[in-house]
Amino acid sequence: MQTIFRLLILFLLLSDVTAQHKTPSSEFALARLKYHGGGDWYNDPSIIPNLLTFMKDNTTINVGSAEAVVEITDEDLFAYPVIFITGHGRISFSNEEAARLRLYLTSGGFLYADDDYGMDKSFRQEIKKVFPQSELIEIPFSHPIFHCHFEFLDGLPKIHEHDGGAPQGFGVFYEGRMVVFYSFNTNISDGWADPNVHNDPPEVRQKAFQMGTNIMVYALTN
């Protein structure tokens, strides 16, 4: 009986070790950044799963099917090659968060920020905390981010009007590498939402998915 009991204990211990050391996944997971300040970082929950589905069907990248959610101070921040931020309201980074986000970005990470009409002022202010010596530079239409998978000869597509005017793409560069891409006055990610959320026509949603794919492909290959 004691022998059987010992074998049972050994089996449970080995099972526990196995559970703690699962084979890591090689699937690309896009992480949504949960931030403080009052903005709705969580809006449009269908956008990332829908983009990943489009990427699965239109690229050779091994992508997952669901979004991850991460805060800057989370231990697993560095497990995600790309993080995504959006929302309508205020964004606020503490000094600790700004320093850690800078470390993430200068260590190979990439941030895609999409203004969902309302976060522009605070995002520009907070990203300046992260890179106080750098500016958000407008990205020319010739940049590879507009051509790396799908062709966008005229730069960012216009998805939503908001204040009118042409869409703009901005970047922050560190040692020659773009580490932040910011889409303004277009709201690319709204076009990834389920069709009945914003009632965008199919051709508009297609452009949004294609541009989103370009951003991810560029981030993963640069």
Image: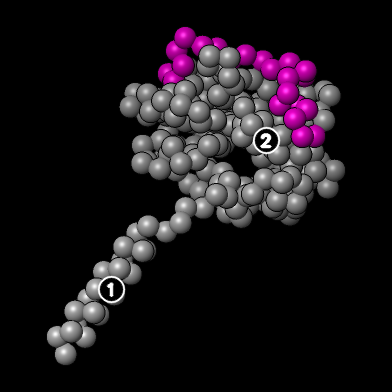
Residue at the far front: name it.
Answer: 3
| Amino acid at circle 2 | Val
Classify mark 2: residues with Cα within 10 Å, few (<14), some (14-19) or many (20+): some
Left or right of 44? Residue 33 is: left
Q: Quadrant of the N terminus?
A: bottom left
Mark in the foreground, 1 or 2: 1
| Residue beneath the point at 36% across and 37% down | 73
Whether residue 188 is visible, yes or no, is no
Q: In which quarter of the image is the C terminus?
A: top right
| Image location (x, y in percent) of residue 128 | 47, 17
Badge 1 is on which residue? 12
| Residue beneath the point at 35% across and 59% down | 20
Instruction: Indicate yes or no whether the magenta region holds residue 145.
Output: yes
| Amino acid at circle 1 | Leu
Examine the residues drawn in magenta and state their main secondary structure: loop
| Image location (x, y in percent) of residue 190 | 68, 42
User: Quadrant of residue 136 in the image?
Assistant: top right
Name the foreground residue: 104 vs 184.
104
Does 96 sit above or below residue 82? Answer: above
Residue 217: numbered disc: 2
Residue 64: numbered disc: none
Does 9 sit above or below residue 130? Answer: below
Residue at the far top: name it.
Answer: 133
- Distance from Cα at disc 1 to Cα at disc 2: 43 Å
Residue stretch rendered in magenta on the structure: 129-150
State the SS at label 2. Answer: helix
Instruction: Looking at the image, tell me whether mark 1 or mark 2 is earlier in sequence order.
Output: 1
Left or right of 169? Residue 24 is: left
| Residue beneath the point at 55% across and 49% down | 26
| Residue beneath the point at 82% across and 23% down | 154
Does 42 sit above or below residue 1? Answer: above
Instruction: Indicate yes or no whether the magenta region holds residue 104.
Output: no
